[in-house]
Amino acid sequence: MQARHTLDDIQHLLTTVLQAPRRWQALAPFADTDGPLAAQVLDEAARFVDSAIAPLNRSGDEEGCRFDAGQVHSPTGFRDAYRAFWQAGWPSLSCAPEHGGQGLPAVLECVLFEWLPGANQGWTMAPGLLHGAYECLKHHASDALQAQYLEKIATGEWLATMCLTEAHAGSDLGLVRTKGVPQPDGSVRVSGSKIFISGGEHDLTDNIIHLVLARLPDAPAGPKGLSLFLVPKMLPHVHQPGALGERNAVVCERIEEKMGLHGSPTCVMRFDDATGWLVGEPHKGLAAMFVMMNAARLHVGLQGIGLLEAAWQKASAYAQERRQMRAPGATEPVSLIHDHPAIRRILHTQRAWIDGGRVLAYHTALQLDVARHHPDASERASAQRWCALVTPVLKAALTDQGFQGASACLQVFGGHGYVREWGVEQIVRDARVSMIYEGTNEIQAIDLLVRKVLADGGQGLSTLLGTLPGAAPSAAASARRHALVEITHTLAIAAQSDPELPYWVADDYLRAVALLLLEWAWGQISAHSHGERWSAPAQAFAQWVLPEFEMRVAILRQRIGQVLEFKPN
């Protein structure tokens, strides 16, 4: 993907459609960040991504990571690229200045982390958790831990991992067995094994900060007994403050052979009485970890957009070069495949998802800053409601489309897409895992419907749909929003008779919400955009994407009706 190819589109969406500079300048920390400054930051970011990161994508995939007696060697060029990345300040865009950050709006960081996976997802896995680790430590770590580690994480000088999964404990973290035993000096000895740890060992940075879920000796069973511990690869030097000391008892046992992401080491990690320190309160590790996971989930949704954009760029360019058969209405015997309606449908449909997804993701990033910094408590609460409800939708819907849409773009190439020459097959492989990690998409749907929407009887979602900013919706859009609110209330009633019902239909429900949000996003785009560039995907959204809403509604109504019809007396 060429990031610079997207600059004009993104500037249009940020400045004209979302009026982002005006919105973030209303918040005190960003009052001095005007539109021209933001444009300069994005221009430089695009140059860096295109020149330093994108050229390593294919070579990193082909070379992969090398494991040698506990050491992991990154593909050629990855270490130098990462050093240039953190020394230029890119990891710290939205971190606070007092922690070594640049204090810029979160949406600028979101654009960067949309471009990076589109350019090189394997490399991007390394800094992908930095922002979440920073937020976790900033909100939950002790002053001593913050003084030791927070600036190193904020600037990206040291990388971080999120050590949750164990061989027997994947989505069900309540089964975690790793132990933490307190020591007289206030530290903790951590013992256990973790799997699927992205960047658990590598040569990109001098230190790696592992955030590990484990149990204290007096912990109750289940998820309420989990605590969070900071376990560094390299311990602090005993006699030289700020220097690195001896290696901690943290061992990489192997790296996984994967379908994609060959440039990123996915590690099996063993902690052998490793020295660590408690983050936050005992037995409340999940609350601290979810700060990290929620930050990561927005970034994973952005991965879906970035990878789909990369696939679309390749497919669109190929469609403008490849000639096959005569297109309908053409006079020449052989036409560009772009002139065939079947190909234009694929390209315009994926463009509709990319553009609409960007508006939703960027609006969410703006709302994150409102939730943190707005002086009005009601505005902060409204923004927090948006982020809580929309984040699982973005993670699930955009990563689903990142994979399915990349596969559709591969179809544009025909057989040429299935071979390595054109690079689109790598995008399909790399995109698949985003539907699994940071909480599977099925869990995102359950989180949305069971834990958030039904928890308050649907009032939060109803308020969100009723207060979407912008012009009044069309009659058809209003009818669709009303239909989902009605279904939500009926679903809450039916669930009292069949507690399994929400779990059966959660995926359909999330998809319906995603389509309504995309309809709102496209309403905002269409109100401020003109020309074929925007009208073609807008039409594709209306014709080929939005009709899915009626199908999802029909599925929901049918399943709810079955429960209510057979409701026990």
Image (cartoon, helix red, strand yellow):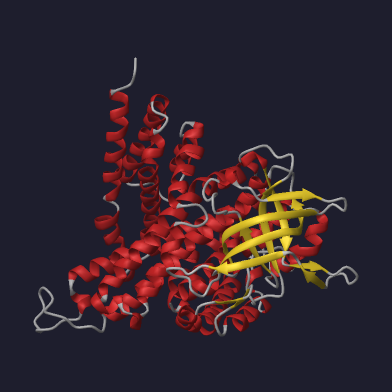
Q: How far from the left and from the top, in percent, is residue 219?
A: 70, 40
Residue 478 visible:
yes
Q: Is residue 187 above or below residue 322?
A: above
Left or right for 322, reference 67: left
Q: How far from the left and from the top, in percent, is residue 20?
A: 54, 61
Q: How far from the left and from the top, in percent, is residue 17?
A: 45, 61
Left or right for 238, reference 113: right
Indicate the quadrant where residue 525 lies: bottom left
The quadrant the C terminus occupies is top left
Residue extending farthest top: 569
Look at 37% across and 79% down and name the residue there. 423
Left or right for 30, reference 495: right
Look at 10% across and 84% down and name the residue there. 332
Indicate the quadrant where residue 133 lies: bottom right
Q: How far from the left and from the top, in percent, is residue 41?
A: 59, 75
Report the front residue among 142 and 175.
175
Report the front residue among 492 and 273.
273
Residue 33 visible:
no
Report the front residue among 338 and 567.
567
Q: Is residue 265 above or below residue 269?
A: below
The quadrant the N terminus occupies is bottom left
Left or right for 496, reference 113: left
Indicate the quadrant where residue 325 lies: bottom left
Number of numbered labels in the structure image: 0
Report the front residue among 394 and 428.
428
Residue extending farthest right: 239
Look at 35% across and 74% down and name the residue there. 425
Q: Is residue 485 above or below residue 169?
A: above
